[in-house]
Image (cartoon, rainbow, N blue to C red):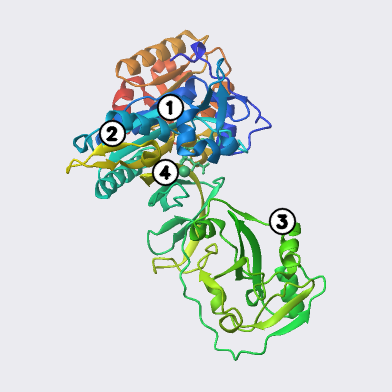
Amino acid sequence: MRQSKTLIPTLKETPADADTSSHKWLLRAGYIRQNFSGVYSFLPLGKRVLDKIEAVVREEMDKIGANEMLMPALQSADLWKETGRWDKMGEELIRLHDRHDREFVLGPTHEEIITSIIRDEIKSYKKLPLTLYQIQTKFRDERRPRFGLLRGREFIMKDAYSFHDSEESLDQSYQEMYQAYSRIFERLGLNFRAVIADAGAMGGKDTHEFMALAEVGEDTIAFSTESNYAANIEMAEVLDTYQVSTEEQKPLTKVDTPNQKTMQEVADFLNHDLDQGMKSLLFKADDDYVLVVTRGDHEVNEIKLKNLLNANDVALLTEDEAFELMQASFGSLGPIGVPEKVKVICDLAVRSLANASCGANQEGVHYINVNPSRDLPEAEYADVRFIKEGDPSPDGQGIIEFAEGIEIGQVFKLGKFYAEKLGASYLNQQGKAATVTTGCYGIGISRTMAAIVEQFHDERGITWPAHVAPYQIHLLVLNNKKAEQRELADQIYQQLKDAGYDVLYDDRDERAGVKFADSDLIGIPYRITVGKKANEGIVECKVRQSNEQEERHQSELLTYFTDVFN
Ligand code: ATP
Ligand code: MG
């Protein structure tokens, strides 16, 4: 492609709203433009990268026998009401209506539609298992669209769905999909981890998220220093390896702690370490009140709490609500003497405390010498805290460290949730009606594009891995007005195109400095510069990632590129 004939509007300055490296470089190098908050156009370069990513995805999907199809973005609200997601998805779901006041949604994902198709079309076990996928635009009215393509309100997703007559069959497809995802992200050049993730309330069980490691990642991954254990910290289990204290139990005593609110203030005031204090937080889990107690140096993990209680919704009470219930404000709450309607759940670490302190549910008063085994006979114990760096790895090998990750894909054993809601049943081998078992699998195509840029850029621009770069070779002619340069460049362009390479040819009447700067910004892996030595047939070849630079004769170019692209 001749650069004079395409649209690559590079920018010298970083736009003020660019909040991450990928956002900044994709805007500056002319790949994307924002239309409004969370909604982007892919300019020609951006479209080419999307196509490359999609090609890899399609190849790997085809390898495991998944069939491509295409479903509509515009969906009738009826199906969403049947599955309950019309209410459950709240404001994230984009709703609209037509001239007859019929309600619609713009699909944030396609479980409803695909399951309704399967319900109508699959009547017998003989048609199972079946895996279908599409690459399609999704809509989510995200609370905070940000980071450019990483969290958009309109974005491109590859979503796949598999249908089965048994759990074993689902297990197998899940494994195949997991392997295919690993191959896809490897081929895209990403540094990623597959991590154990939260299955949420949709009745599913096993699920893994694929995380591209990047500082801007919104998820934290807990991984082992010794094994390949990795989990989203939302899910990482904490082993019960706490040392039970052998300290002699002292009598429970109330002490005044005026104006001491935070855990640290109370610990300082009572002259003990933070981990000798018990932190109490009040939650409403659906319709029930729960007081959750952790050690002072630990944090409550609401996802674990939600899963433990099997609740749809878990939320902290406000200080006013807490006061009304307990007659004490946040700093003075504790698990001793709580009203009957409040359930007490203590983290496992609390069980091994001895002579600890906690709020006394009385303004400005704490208990000291609390011994949970003696003083909290009613409490339930469970793992409800976030794992910390330095904790033992849940698989017993090594210790935990953290890294930030961007969720680029997820595989999920959904089970029967949607099939039951929508009545997707088939006749099994015994001729009896049975409900279809389902898996669902997503890859954020546009998010993956940004994740790649997060990992592949330097101070001058993008440094694409070869498989996803918009073009393979960037050909620059430094001085358009010099006939010998122009002629040689034209020849090389034709030669490379004939040999089947994707070449971007900068034939613009721009200064050399502008061409070099734009080329660095755009980040095509190999660059050929035709300049002063054109009359000798000599050009300069440069590798974008390594900056290696070498002169070559025109006649050597084809062998050189055959080498590097193999
Ligand atoms: P997140 O937790 O980041 O909001 P999610 O878990 O809700 O994502 P899924 O429903 O699992 O997302 O969607 C499948 C994939 O689609 C995700 O793994 C991610 O790569 C991509 N994706 C989800 N939301 C967005 C978004 N707002 N913008 C771009 N890509 C997205
Ligand atoms: Mg997800």
Reading the image, the residue beneath label 3 is 318
Mark 1 and mark 2 residues within 8 Å of each other at the beta carbon: no
Q: Quadrant of the N terminus?
A: top left
**Tag 4: residue type?**
Gln
Residue type at mark 2 is: Ala
**Disc 4 secondary structure class:** strand
The alpha-carbon separation of the residues under discs 1 and 2 comes to: 16 Å
Dot 4, crowdedness within 10 Å: few (<14), some or many (≥20)?
A: many
Task: Judge left or right: residue 483 versus residue 274.
Answer: left
Q: Quarter-wise, where is residue 153 in the image? A: top right
**Label at residue 66:** 2
Q: Mark yes or no: residue 147 visible.
A: no
Q: Which mark is residue 136?
A: 1
Mark 2 or mark 3: whose residue is earlier in sequence:
2
Judge by depth and name the residue closer to the eye, 371 or 525.
371
Of labels 1 and 3, the one closer to you? 3
Q: Earlier in the sequence, mark 3 or mark 4?
A: 3
Q: Amino acid at mark 3?
A: Thr
Which residue has dot 4 on it?
410
Pointer 2 local density, CA inside 10 Å: few below 14, some 14–19, many at least 20 = many
Badge 3: few (under 14), some or many (20 or more) residues near its Cα, within 10 Å?
Answer: few
| Residues at circles 2 and 3 in contact by the CB criterion of under 8 Å | no
Q: Is there any visible trace of residue 86 in the rendered image?
A: yes
Q: Earlier in the sequence, mark 4 or mark 1?
A: 1
Q: At 52% from the left edge and 82% from the top edge, which residue is drawn?
A: 244
The x and y percentages for residue 380 are 53, 71
Q: Is mark 4 within 8 Å of ligand 2?
A: yes
Q: Is residue 444 left or right of residue 153?
A: left
Looking at the image, is mark 1 or mark 3 earlier in the sequence? Answer: 1
Residues at discs 3 and 4 in contact (Cβ within 8 Å): no
Q: Earlier in the sequence, mark 1 or mark 2?
A: 2
